[in-house]
């Protein structure tokens, strides 16, 4: 249930954020550019229940999501800083200063699940619209990267010990008495597992690893026998059995118990051979620097992601791009629909010298997407991804891309303000020199 619309016609007699803030502040300018009414119009049908307490305003929740990824903050931090930052409050539609937190941090989780992937795509679409003509470039750059999950580096021993811990917790919650808890045994085995890379300790450590796996299997089978039929832990025990059966060189392995959909992806990096998460595709305008497409995948071949990425671009922009420049990982297709795909390769003799130089320049320009991916990871929470499941993978990349576009406009507003300040200072300096001369 939504709250009743508040009337802003009657402002406070003594204090109003609109009149007291610096109207040249980038967040102030950006808040007046965003079409907040569109979000209210699109998200209002999602609040169809008349029961319970009224929900928080839609503008507040959308503004918190944008600020969270633009400022690289957690749910808890953005809620806390909102009560301290007067510009955050104005950006989220507040007319007067509020010294308390706007909501509980968990309400952001519920709001993300409420709007879903389509709602996050709507936020990305609005961020592209804010960029104006810069988002209309028909020449795009494409690249993929890995969106790493917030999990520890996976090893079989870690998984087995976590399984043992979870089995003990299930037994405690269900009142099941285990034949043996292996507490002291596991402590001794942990000592044997230390320094496993040392040649003198390798044999002892491998023996301890096998014993830990055996203990994990015993506890899983004992729970399966003693739990009643139709219990709530069927899927979890099946996951444990799959972990116990998997081999070192097997496929479709489980790398995390709480994120079983994580993939092991190798991108050929010298400093990081394997990354654990999922693959994402980025579409970036070549000449203006706006992210116009962002989509999450599993562990598909790069060339197979391009068709879906172009379909998303068509939904966001209502048109298809003329050209897409990609790296050699996209080899296999030269055209998708009306869009031409260019990858680096020896030029045909039919191309003129001018066409070859133009193509080379476009491929060099494509490399500009690499630092953009770095900014998405370091500044906008693309990596590590703290959202859970495949749904979290899908919305995190969309919100990170939208935050990048909003941050881009904030930087443009800052540059305009700095340029205006320099012009005013130059005018004042010239007038001062003129007066001194006279």
Image: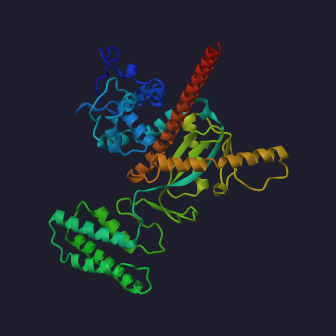
List x then y, in percent, for residue 143. 60, 51
Residue toward you, 99 or 102: 99
Q: How is the image coloured?
A: rainbow
The extreme top residue here reads: 438
Q: Count up the numbered dots.
A: 0
Residue ID at (48%, 69%): 251
Along the line of sight, the residue nearer the viewer: 132 or 194: 194
Residue at 58%, 44% in the rendered image: 283
Q: Quadrant of the N terminus?
A: top left
Residue 262's place in the image compared with 248, above or below, is above
Residue under the point 22% across and 68% down: 168
Closest to the observer: 236 or 32? Answer: 32
Q: Is residue 164 above or below residue 1?
A: below
Q: Is residue 417 visible?
A: yes
Residue at image coords 33%, 68%: 240
User: Which of 304 and 371 lies nearest the eye of the viewer?
Assistant: 371
Indicate the quadrant where residue 428 lies: top right
Tell me where residue 61 appears, x and y as whole percent.
36, 35
Q: Quadrant of residue 177?
A: bottom left
Quick check: can you spot residue 117?
no
In this rendering, position of residue 349 left or right of residue 360: right
Determine whether, in the image, residue 390 is placed left or right of residue 372. Answer: left
**The C terminus sits in image quarter:** top right
- Residue 345 place in picture, x, y as percent: 74, 56
Position of residue 81 measured from the top left corner of the image (x, y, whole percent): 34, 38
């Amino acid at each position: 249930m939504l709250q009743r619309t508040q009337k802003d016609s009657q402002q406070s007699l003594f204090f109003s954020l609109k009149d007291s803030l610096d109207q040249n502040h980038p967040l102030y300018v950006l808040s007046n550019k965003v079409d907040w009414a569109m979000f209210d119009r699109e998200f209002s049908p999602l609040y169809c229940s008349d029961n319970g307490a009224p929900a928080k305003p839609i503008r507040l929740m959308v503004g918190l999501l944008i600020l969270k990824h633009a400022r690289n903050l957690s749910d808890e931090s953005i809620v806390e800083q909102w009560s301290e930052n007067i510009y955050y409050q104005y950006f989220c539609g507040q007319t007067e200063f509020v010294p308390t937190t706007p909501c509980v941090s968990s309400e952001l989780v519920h709001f993300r699940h409420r709007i879903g992937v389509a709602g996050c795509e709507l936020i990305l679409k609005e961020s592209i619209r804010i960029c104006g003509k810069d988002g209309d470039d028909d020449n795009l750059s494409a690249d993929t990267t890995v969106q790493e999950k917030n999990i520890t580096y996976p090893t079989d021993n870690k998984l087995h010990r976590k399984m043992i811990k979870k089995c003990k917790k299930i037994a405690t919650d269900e009142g099941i008495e285990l034949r043996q808890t292996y507490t002291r045994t596991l402590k001794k085995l942990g000592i044997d597992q230390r320094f496993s890379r040392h040649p003198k300790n390798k044999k002892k450590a491998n023996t301890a690893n096998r014993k830990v796996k055996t203990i994990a299997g015993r506890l899983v089978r004992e729970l399966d026998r003693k739990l009643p039929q139709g219990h709530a832990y069927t899927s979890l025990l099946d996951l444990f059995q799959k972990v116990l059966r998997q081999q070192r060189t097997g496929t479709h392995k489980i790398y995390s118990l709480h994120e079983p959909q994580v993939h092991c992806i190798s991108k050929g990096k010298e400093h990081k051979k394997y990354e654990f998460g999922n693959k994402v595709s980025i579409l970036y305008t070549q000449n203006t620097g706006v992210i116009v497409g962002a989509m999450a995948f599993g562990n598909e071949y790069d060339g197979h992601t391009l068709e879906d990425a172009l379909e998303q671009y068509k939904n966001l922009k209502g048109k298809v791009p003329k050209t897409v420049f990609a790296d050699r990982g996209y080899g296999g297709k030269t055209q998708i629909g009306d869009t031409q795909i260019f990858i680096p390769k020896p030029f045909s003799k039919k191309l003129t010298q001018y066409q070859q130089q133009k193509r080379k320049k476009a491929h060099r320009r494509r490399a500009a997407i690499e630092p953009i991916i770095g900014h998405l990871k370091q500044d906008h929470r693309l990596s590590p991804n703290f959202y859970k499941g495949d749904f979290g993978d899908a919305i995190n990349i969309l919100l990170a891309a939208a935050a990048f576009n909003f941050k881009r406009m904030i930087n443009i507003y800052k540059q305009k303000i700095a340029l205006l300040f320099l012009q005013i200072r130059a005018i004042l300096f010239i007038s001062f020199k003129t007066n001194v001369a006279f």
